[in-house]
Image (cartoon, rainbow, N blue to C red):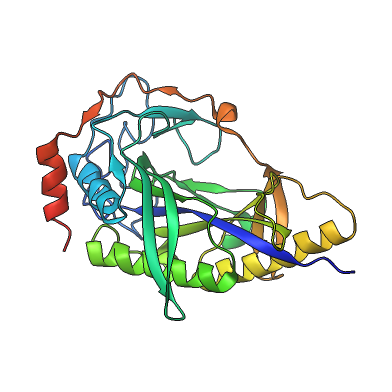
Amino acid sequence: MVMDFEPVIGFEIHAELKTRSKVFCGCRVEFGAPPNTNVCPVCLGMPGTLPVLNRRCVDLVLRTALAMNCEINERATFDRKNYYYPDLPKNYQISQQYAILGVRGGFEFALDGQVRRVRINNIHLEEDAGKNIHAESFGREEYSLVDLNRAGTGLMEIVTEPDLRSVEEAEAFMKAVKNLLQYLDVSDCKMQEGSLRFELNVSVRPKGSDQLSPAYVEVKNVASVKSVLAAAEYEIKRQSKVYREGGRVEKETRLWDDAARCTRPMRSKEAAKDYRYFPEPDLVEVRVDPQWRERARREIP
């Protein structure tokens, strides 16, 4: 007897915030500018520089969190997420881990005349990384280049619970989220420019089971809704085949190869402890009083 499996899908959604300047410095946010021109000692991570929070970024995250029915923490803090990558000049990212702006929300969308609901784990504010430009882009195989214009851009991350059960649900959800963010005017949502990125988390389980698989796969490098859906379909088939053959699915991060139409292993999946989060000492806590929360609510169209 062939066992049937169903997918379990969640998302980490990154949306660049629609502001004129970056989240912790005054550098301009501008797509397509000449490389490394919209930078300063702060977003380059120079020793001795101090971040200053762009309040407008907090306003936009609060607006989104309220629209997604999140609870708003009266006190939110920033934390350092430590990892090394060439496009991260400080070797850590300022993010939120312990006291997050918006938590425990829910987002409803329609599919086939039915209302579906996805739980929102949290919505937090962080800074974007820069951009690596690899050899094939400019014909010099021995080099990769780094453009830090994007580093420090205000980034909102929306983390969902794994509540989606089909590729069709995932497609409807993504389109509804994009429409909401554009309606709220918090992001321009231009996926082709990287200002809206859906990172897919997918696992499979036997149909009828209510247990979540501990081995889920995160898929990166998906630049369009079509690519996300293709990656989801590929992973569902791949993981189901592994289980049917008696194998084990590894908990890992994989890259979507759009040309080959498949995912490829990138690295084992990190846990929070791997990033060695600790409080950001250079930023004070954000206190969201009732008046601020109501102002953000009134800005919802």
Residue 122, by quadrant, is top left
Note whether 279 is above or below 142 in the view shown: above
Note whether 274 is above or below 150 in the view shown: above
- Image spot of residue 58 (x, y percent): 24, 42
Choose between 298 and 38: the one closer to the eye: 298
**Residue at the spot x=14%, y=56% of the render?**
299
How many callouts does the rendering have?
0
- Image spot of residue 8 (x, y percent): 62, 58
Q: Which residue lies furthest to the bottom in this view?
A: 112
Asked if residue 175 shows in the view, the reply is: yes
**Residue at the spot x=70%, y=67% of the render?**
234
**Residue at the spot x=44%, y=53% of the render?**
119
**Residue at the spot x=51%, y=55% of the render?**
11
In the drawing, does residue 27 fall left or right of residue 261? left
Asked if residue 138 shows in the view, the reply is: no
Choose between 69 and 189: the one closer to the eye: 69
Name the image quarter holding the N terminus: bottom right
In the drawing, does residue 247 fall left or right of residue 49? right
Note whether 83 is above or below 238 in the view shown: above
- Image spot of residue 124 (x, y percent): 36, 42
